Amino acid sequence: MTVEDENGEEKQEVKKGYEFLEDLPGIGPATAQKLRELGFHTIESLAMATARELEPAGIGEKKAFSIIEAARSSISVSFIRANELLRMRQNVLRLTTGSKSLDKLLDGGLETQTITEFYGEYGSGKSQLCHQLCVNVQLPPERGGLNAAALYIDTENTFRTERIVQMATHLGLDPNQVVKNIIYAEAYTSDHQMFLLDNADEIIKKNNVKLIIIDSLTSHFRSEYLGREMLASRQQKLNKHMHKLIRLARAFNTVAVVTNQVMAKPDVFFGNSVHPIGGHIVGHTSHTRVYLRRSSRGPVRIARLVSSPYLPEGEEIFKITENGIEDVSEEEKPRSRGR
């Protein structure tokens, strides 16, 4: 953070850095172990925590605020000037989707420090896109990648290493190395899904992860929380889960991607009757929402940018082939791209 000296000139404020939890004032080995059991393995994760989340470790509210403040000061999480925010925005990285058209729709690709949500019906290409991103993130920056690893949480058993090998080979990458750089976990329940993400901070930091994928976000929640009487409980858990994801994305400057299922609203007679699961909780927490749907022309898919903090709505098309996500030639473009 920059501050002004007595002459009114800006200078860089020096922050004390902490490497391990035990380095923070007020944390001994026993407390550090309890925090790790709660899923706080790094300074970055503590900096994004709330005082209430530290209570199970036997830490009082006053001490919790002190610990969190020390962690935040270490990574400069504080009030800043807008011109400094502008400089920080220059640190935001972008990851290519593999399609120039889709990248154009997203202003150059998927942003780090934000959540991008892809939703659509079965077969619309959500998981295929996730596979492609796992390969693309390992590309060098000059090819649209981040030269980093990926973390993949699979809730529907849709991840296939064979598909990764196909895509990596097409891009001229070593398939064995690409597969090695994807850290995979299958979530069996919604609680297990939350547990995996809650304990991911150390893995992200140690393995230079720059892409976090949850495919799909709502599958377990949708099947486990049935009926209106369980809706509030489901939404509360989804809210906590999504906020954990955005904290990780911001703390480690990663791209966060979730896929989402859809439901049909039979009472909608005009416009699109297909809506993503999760309601306002998922809608407000996802920064960028993209609706994927099939075209009448085989491998061609239509991507519609539904919401973004700064981009206008729009549509682009791409195709899914054995090589992965690719652009559509003029001959392959559907005649009508209306809703």
Image (spheres, helix red, strand yellow):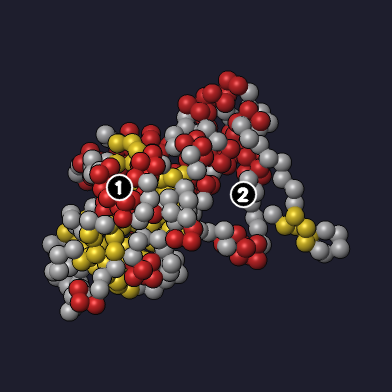
Q: Nearer the viewer, residue 87 or 328?
A: 328
- Quadrant for residue 26, please give it: top right
- Quadrant for residue 74, please give it: top right
Residue 150: x and y in percent read 41, 45
Residue at position x 33%, y 36% in the image = 185
Residue 336: x and y in percent read 18, 78
Residue at position x 27%, y 50% in the image = 166
Residue at position x 38%, y 57% in the image = 116
In the picture, the quarter occupied by the N terminus is bottom right
Query: Residue 164 — which label?
Result: 1
As drawn, is 134 to the left or to the right of 140? left
In the picture, the quarter occupied by the C terminus is bottom left
* Amino acid type at mark 2: Val
Secondary structure found at label 1: helix
**219 to 37, vertically: above or below:** below
Residue position for label 2: 77
Local crowd size for mark 2, using a 10 Å CA cut-off: few (<14), some (14–19), many (≥20): some
Local crowd size for mark 1, using a 10 Å CA cut-off: few (<14), some (14–19), many (≥20): many
* Amino acid type at mark 1: Ile
Give how far apart the Cα atoms at labels 2 and 1 are: 37 Å
Residue 119: x and y in percent read 27, 57
